[in-house]
Image: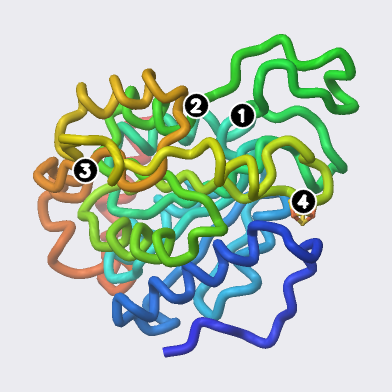
């Protein structure tokens, strides 16, 4: 099982997105998937190019719209493993409405955010997850806003699987993505993926020094949402590992009678002429 294609990514040398791509490919292979069982849907931004770099079905959606497309794909074909992906600008600014609704909806897809805390594709502006005081061309005196903390937002929105890692820890990231794909429901994975060209603050070394592993927190219970939120607050969102997992929550699909019988795309659509005319008459 090889999820590599012959397209060479045009990310800057050293960009964190390379490792996220590799971790996704390893995780899919590790989970026994075939390329024709996977769909990768992305938004706009450097990370949005990912859908072209993985051997699978793919769709490069418009800005902030990876999640609506990904959810539509899953509803149409329940047999596909669907991964949505994009950056912090894509998912937490223009796409934030979709992100929060997908989190609460719990449809069975995986959302991987490559969070580099800056807009890289447009040459370095402050993003929703940039730190307070962050200096860029768009905030030359330093950002005066609090940053979005993705895992806090995810948990508060009712997510059933919340994880965070950094692209330099490819072993952990691969394992997290494997578990995220296996989770029956919406799985949210925030990956700190350094932009080596424009973000000179949140570097690989910065994350090495500042991220705290869940494994090092004594008595941490991954199934306890209140405890998870307390730990996020106490550590300023700088945690890595699986932060919260509720394997028992029903997925969106489980509420839909007959959804599991056959994928919608392979069902025969029958609409009798009389039925159609009756339906149209109701609108007159
Ligand atoms: Fe990666 Fe930044 Fe280069 Fe974009 S600009 S490819 S995020 S290093």
Disc 4 under 8 Å from ligand 1? The reply is yes
Residue 60 vs residue 273: left or right?
right
Residue 60 vs residue 14: left or right?
left
How far apart are labels 1 and 2 at the CA level?
7 Å
From the image, which quarter does the C terminus lie in?
top left
Of the two numbered discs 3 and 2 on the same chain, state the one appearing first in sequence.
Answer: 2
Q: Residues within 10 Å of mark 4 (few under 14, many from 20)?
A: some
Q: Please, is residue 79 above or below residue 107 in the view?
A: below
Element marked by disc 3: strand
In terms of depth relative to the viewer, which is nearer, 195 or 54?
195
Element marked by disc 2: loop
How far apart are labels 3 and 4 at the CA level?
32 Å
Q: Residue at the spot x=48%, y=88% of the render?
A: 2
Q: Mark 1 points at which residue?
A: 129
Q: Residue at the spot x=24%, y=49% of the render?
A: 185
Q: Name the residue under label 2.
A: 149
The picture places residue 231, in percent across and down from the top left corner, at 31, 25
Front disc: 3 or 4: 4
How far apart are labels 3 and 1 at the CA level?
23 Å
Tags 3 and 2 touching, CB below 8 Å: no
How far apart are labels 4 and 2 at the CA level?
21 Å
Q: Mark 3 points at which residue?
A: 245
The picture places residue 102, in percent across and down from the top left corner, at 38, 38
The picture places residue 256, in percent across and down from the top left corner, at 16, 47
Q: Residue 196 carries which label?
A: 4
How far apart are labels 4 and 1 at the CA level?
16 Å
Of the two numbered discs 4 and 1 on the same chain, state the one appearing first in sequence.
Answer: 1
Element marked by disc 4: loop
The picture places residue 106, in percent across and down from the top left corner, at 27, 41
Q: How crowded is mark 2: few (under 14 residues within 10 Å), some or many (20 or more)?
A: some
Tags 1 and 2 touching, CB below 8 Å: yes
């Amino acid at each position: 099982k090889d999820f590599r294609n012959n397209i060479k990514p045009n990310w800057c040398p050293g960009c964190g997105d390379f490792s996220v791509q590799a971790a996704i490919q390893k995780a899919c292979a590790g989970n026994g998937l075939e390329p024709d069982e996977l769909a990768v849907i992305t938004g706009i931004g450097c990370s949005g190019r990912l859908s072209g770099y993985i051997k699978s079905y793919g769709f490069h959606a418009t800005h902030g719209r990876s999640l609506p497309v990904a959810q539509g794909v899953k509803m149409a074909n329940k047999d596909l493993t669907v991964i949505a992906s994009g950056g912090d600008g894509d998912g937490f600014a223009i796409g934030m409405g979709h992100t929060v609704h997908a989190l609460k909806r719990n449809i069975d897809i995986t959302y991987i955010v490559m969070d580099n805390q800056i807009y890289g594709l447009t040459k370095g502006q402050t993003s929703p997850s940039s730190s307070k005081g962050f200096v860029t061309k768009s905030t030359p005196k330093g950002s005066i806003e609090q940053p979005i903390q993705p895992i806090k937002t995810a948990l508060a929105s009712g997510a059933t699987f919340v994880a965070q890692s950094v692209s330099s820890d490819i072993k952990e990231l691969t394992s997290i993505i494997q578990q995220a794909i296996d989770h029956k429901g919406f799985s949210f994975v925030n990956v700190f993926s350094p932009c080596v060209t424009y973000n000179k603050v949140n570097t690989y070394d910065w994350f090495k020094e500042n991220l705290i592993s869940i494994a090092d927190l004594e008595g941490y219970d991954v199934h306890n949402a209140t405890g998870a939120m307390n730990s996020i607050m106490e550590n300023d969102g700088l945690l890595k590992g699986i932060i919260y997992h509720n394997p028992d929550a029903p997925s969106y699909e489980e509420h839909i009678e007959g959804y599991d019988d056959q994928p919608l795309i392979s069902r025969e659509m029958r609409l009798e002429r009389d039925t159609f005319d009756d339906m149209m008459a109701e609108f007159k």
